[in-house]
Image (tube, rainbow, N blue to C red):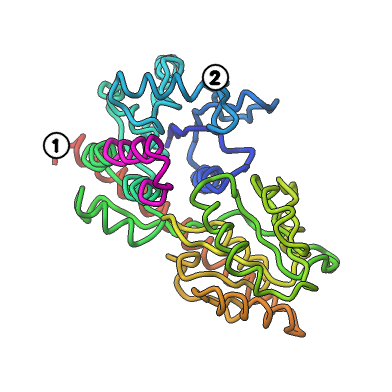
């Protein structure tokens, strides 16, 4: 089948969890023999090549913090057009032109709308007689509502904008659920939400596998006791890092070295003498294997945690909150779940002091089983969509 994958940012650089998730779907569909063309933007602040099978709609700033004056224009346009700010960043005539051009050259069998933020494209797909799939990375309406409630009381404007986005993106998610033939969710809790919107027969749970983790041929030398890896510049993840630095790190012995990697991690430097932020990490696998234990202090958010999946697959000891392992089912014995600062800190200390490394075979088996399930889920969904289309064309 020829599939168009409509996303926000071309995900091949894998610079965030959302991009890793999107690329996982693209890779799985291609592994199953489908011809996938990916549409999306490229960041204007870095030079990057566009891979074969992808169409760069245009360059534009993506992260609000690095967008200079663009956010003010996005806000103004969003208010005038009554669209969510989080959609306005990706709304453009360039995107529509790219689709029209591609459609004139070769029509797709199916279109995948990746992220609720791309829901604005629905109104421009009315003339495309193809199957439609919506990948819901999160229930965005709930996510932005939660963020609005957690904004400081003196940030009235930010809280108002987040609440507005929650309401408007909720309407878009409802339209996506109604107008798409299938909804793919990453956790069962989100699937239940979309079951209410669209009916159980449309929604499908996709147990995301994350990136394959390669084990080093030789043991990586342990460089730190505790490692944290994530995109901390994102507000939801940032709250987890704040919880760790303020509530957990003070309970860790000062002779335990703690290293934080990922965008936004530099903010931890100077908070505690044994805490170091190293910024963006080029080799996440090395970072994980060089840590005695990985901490996943998730305290808010929705969807599945890719960093948790990859940490478990790496065969490194993990301490996570309950929220950090949501949707992952049965966990290997080297994963500990703790939800209070004291329990979390104690679990980290115990993991650092543990004399043995986890059994690598357990990690490989867990990751292989999850990847096989992911491929099976996508294969079954694609077959069901094709069967539905064939029945409609036959007049059944």
Left or right? Give the position of 55 relative to 283.
left
Residue occupying the point 25% across, 24% down: 126
Q: Is residue 130 left or right of residue 216?
A: left
Secondary structure of the residue carrying tag 2 is: strand
Q: Earlier in the sequence, mark 2 or mark 1?
A: 2
Considering depth in this image, is 389 or 150 the residue closer to the camera?
A: 150
- Find residue 395 and name its label: 1
Tell me the residue at 75%/67% (across/down).
291
Which disc is residue 58 wearing? 2
For mark 1, give the secondary structure. Answer: loop
How packed mark 1 is, by other alpha carbons closer than 10 Å (few <14, some 14-19, many 20 or more), is few
Q: Position of residue 261 (x, y in %)?
A: 70, 53
Residue 163 within the magenta-colored segment of the rendering: yes
Q: Residue sitting at 40 percent across and 18 percent down? A: 96
Q: Is residue 144 left or right of residue 181?
A: right
Q: Position of residue 87 (x, y in %)?
A: 39, 30
Point out the frontmost of discs 2 and 1.
Answer: 2
Of the pair 356 and 274, the residue shown nearer to us: 274
Mark 2–mark 1 Cα distance, whole angstroms, equals: 41 Å
Foreground pick, 201 / 387: 201
> Which quarter of the picture shows residue 351?
bottom right
Query: Principal SS element in the magenta part?
Result: helix
Q: Residue sitting at 67 percent across and 59 percent down?
A: 213
Q: Position of residue 309 (x, y in %)?
A: 56, 62
Q: Is residue 89 magenta?
A: no
Region in magenta: 148-169
């Amino acid at each position: 089948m020829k599939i168009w994958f409509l996303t926000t940012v071309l995900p091949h650089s894998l610079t965030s969890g959302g991009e890793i998730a999107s690329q996982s779907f693209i890779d799985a569909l291609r592994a199953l023999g489908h011809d996938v063309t990916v549409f999306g933007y490229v960041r204007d602040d870095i030079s990057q090549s566009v891979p074969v099978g992808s169409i760069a709609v245009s360059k534009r700033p993506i992260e609000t913090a690095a967008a200079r004056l663009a956010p003010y224009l996005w806000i103004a346009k969003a208010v005038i057009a009554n669209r969510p700010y989080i959609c306005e960043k990706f709304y453009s005539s360039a995107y529509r032109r790219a689709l029209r051009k591609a459609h004139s050259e070769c029509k797709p069998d199916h279109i995948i709308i990746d992220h609720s933020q791309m829901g604005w494209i629905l109104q421009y797909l009315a003339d495309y007689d193809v199957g439609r799939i919506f990948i819901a990375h999160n229930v965005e309406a709930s996510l932005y509502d939660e963020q609005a409630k957690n904004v400081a009381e003196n940030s009235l404007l930010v809280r108002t904008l987040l609440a507005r986005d929650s309401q408007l993106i909720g309407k878009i998610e409802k339209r996506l659920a109604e107008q798409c033939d299938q909804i793919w969710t990453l956790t069962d809790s989100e699937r239940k939400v979309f079951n209410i919107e669209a009916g159980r027969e449309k929604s499908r749970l996709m147990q995301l596998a994350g990136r394959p983790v390669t084990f080093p041929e030789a043991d990586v030398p342990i460089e730190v006791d505790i490692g944290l890896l994530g995109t901390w510049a994102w507000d939801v993840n940032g709250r987890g890092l704040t919880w760790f630095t303020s509530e957990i790190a003070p309970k860790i012995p000062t002779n335990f070295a703690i290293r934080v990697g990922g965008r936004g991690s530099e903010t931890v430097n100077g908070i505690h003498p044994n805490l170091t932020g190293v910024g963006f990490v080029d080799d996440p696998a090395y970072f994980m294997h060089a840590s005695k234990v990985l901490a996943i202090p998730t305290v808010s958010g929705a969807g599945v945690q890719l960093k948790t999946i990859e940490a478990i697959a790496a065969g490194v000891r993990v301490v996570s909150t309950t929220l950090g392992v949501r949707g992952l089912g049965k966990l290997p014995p080297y994963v500990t779940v703790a939800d209070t600062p004291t329990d979390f800190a104690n679990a980290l200390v115990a993991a650092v002091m543990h004399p043995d490394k986890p059994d690598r075979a357990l990690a490989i088996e867990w990751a292989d089983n999850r990847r096989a399930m992911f491929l099976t889920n996508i294969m079954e969904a694609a077959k069901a969509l094709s069967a539905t289309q064939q029945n409609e064309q036959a007049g059944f």
